[in-house]
Amino acid sequence: MTSTSRLTTSMIPCCTCGTIIAPNSSNQCASCLATVDIASLIRRGPGGCDLIVHQCRKCRRYERDSNNKKFIYLEPETPEMMALLLKQIPALSGRSTQYVKRAGVQALQVLDSMFIWTEPNSMRQRLMLTIKADINDVSIQQRIKVEFIVKWKECPDCTKVARQNTWSAIVQLRQKRDDSRKGLLILELAIARNALMRKHILSVQTKKAGFDFYFPSLDKARHFTQYLSKVAPMRIKTTQSLVSEDKTNNTANIRHTLACEMVPLCRDDLVVIGKQAKGAGKLTGKLCLVLRVSSAVRLITVSPSREVDVASQCTELHSDTYWRGESSYRLFLSSRRLVRFVVLDVELCDDERDWYNSGDSNELNEGPQSGVSKYALADVEVARETDFGVNDETFMCVTHLGHLLSPGDVVLGYDLASTVLSSEAEWSIENDVTSNFVMPDIVLVKKIKGGQDQSKVEGGDDNAELKHKKGKAKSSGSKKRDRRMKKEEKKQQKLAAAAARMGLNTEEDVYFDEDDFFDGEGDPISEAVQKENEKFKKEVDMDEDLADDLAIVEAELAEQAFPDNEDDEAH
């Protein structure tokens, strides 16, 4: 009797089939509740239409977020593809769940999911889902087939490619010198390390001495030039041209050109500062060495005085000062004329500051806040590396590299004693240099590793691909034309390699927009870009001074904020 009373008081029959069940809000058993059409809720897309996933026809990327217009690369039947498809189901993602609640379903949960094979050209994606649903305090489980329709939708990057003729502003970046590739290294780093700055570039083209960047608006181009002007000294000129106008509606199509001309001075160059130069301070009428090029050009005299501190014999040349007196600053020798020397003896000029051999030198010279200057004047005895075993000729010179050199080191420098100067360089020495300036025989520039070859550092192997090419006998005119073409092709190859390091695709003259390009994420980088990046890393590793300059630029760029985000939010 006790068991019968418990049955009648705590259990009830199903209102549909009569099965004895525990009471619930619908008074139905799980079998009867399973007849609820959960599949129609899962297969329902936004607005009651079919489930749709968008794919770009050209780049084959899938749309991840329709609000931010973000497209990503996904391989078929991968976990990432599964996650993307499940997010497209409104009933599972939490969007528009009113019709789910009206059907009496309290919660939906995915227990298992798997792909169903489909023909690759069918433009369909099919899944088999195991869904757990809570209906009126009763949990039921169903296996449902879900089909997604793949539709074409052009991504923003491919839209930029298709609208190349709609650019409104062009930035012409130039450095007018023979070896312009070296001067563009710092700007390459600035462009490569800032994805926001590359965001609005429609396309890019390599030119003879620089690049052409195309932008959709003048504001974006101005932000780009302002950013670059903080990294390298340059002057910016803005011009505009009228393409078309509509006088009825008072509108016009105007294209703007921003010409950015960099100061044609690079690190390790020898520069003659004329007597009439303004803004050079004590270096007026002297031969100077370029120590660093960032937002300003840092110069030091090649014949420093032993009685004066090395810091007082340096000056900074800003772009405005240079362009006002451009004729007073003449390039004397470039880094192509550097020669290898071996250090035989080093003696610091100031003995009171001779902490070079002290035990605490490492601690004192750590970081820019250490209180110890990187450079110190010293009398150095050197010999040409090519003279070893041939003659005993040595040279004495005063250099600013006293803290960096020790006997046995290999340094690069200018051999002014045996260098054949051009007529323009000889004229500069006779007319621009003051009479009391002492011309040194040797100018030491930087310390290098003993096993390095300067030709490799400066890119001397660029002709290796052209050495094996042989052609038929040609006339003198054809040979001259071929030489000009090969020389221009060589320059274009160097500029194309620089564009590859910046993350720009020059094969189609189109900007390669990928925010994770330098972070090692996303799509694999092309082999050509990988080779250029490896070559650039080797060049930085070989040149310690260049590595220091790049580190300083990175620190400056980290403190700067690109203002495009504010503009986007405002619009």
Image (tube, rainbow, N blue to C red):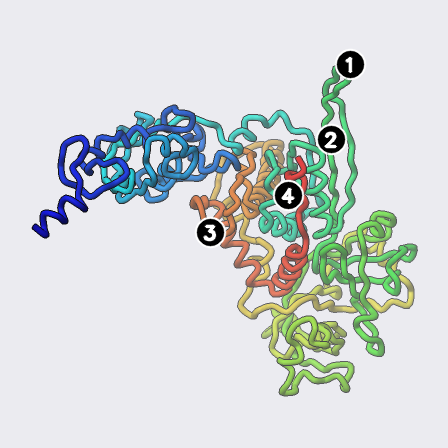
The mark nearer the N terminus, 1 or 3, is: 1
Q: Secondary structure at mark 2?
A: strand
Q: Which mark is residue 256?
A: 2
Mark 2–mark 4 CB contact (< 8 Å): no
Q: Residue at x 83, y 74 (%)?
A: 305
The CA distance from mark 1 to mark 3 is: 51 Å
Measured as percent of width and height from the top left, residue 490 is found at 58, 42
Residue at 28% across / 42% down in the picture?
Answer: 137
Could you tell me residue 525's position as x and y percent?
45, 46
* Above or below for 310 versus 110: below
Can you see residue 115?
Answer: no
Of badges 3 and 4, nearer the viewer stands 4
The amino acid at mark 3 is: Gly
Q: Position of residue 306 (x, y in %)?
A: 82, 77
Q: Is residue 483 above or below residue 270?
A: above
Q: Nearer the viewer, mark 2 or mark 4?
A: 4
Q: Give SS at disc 3.
A: loop
Q: Is residue 495 left or right of residue 81?
A: right
Write the residue at 59% across / 61% down.
Answer: 454
Return the disc, 2 or 1, that comes first in the chain's sequence: 1
Residue bearing mark 3: 520
Secondary structure type for disc 1: loop
Residue to which mark 4 is pinned: 565
Q: Which residue is mark 1?
A: 247
Q: Secondary structure at mark 4?
A: helix
Total number of numbered discs in the rendering:
4
Considering every residue shown, the one lying at the far top of the view is: 248
The mark closer to the camera, 1 or 3, is 1
* Gap in angstroms between the C-alphas marked 2 and 4: 23 Å
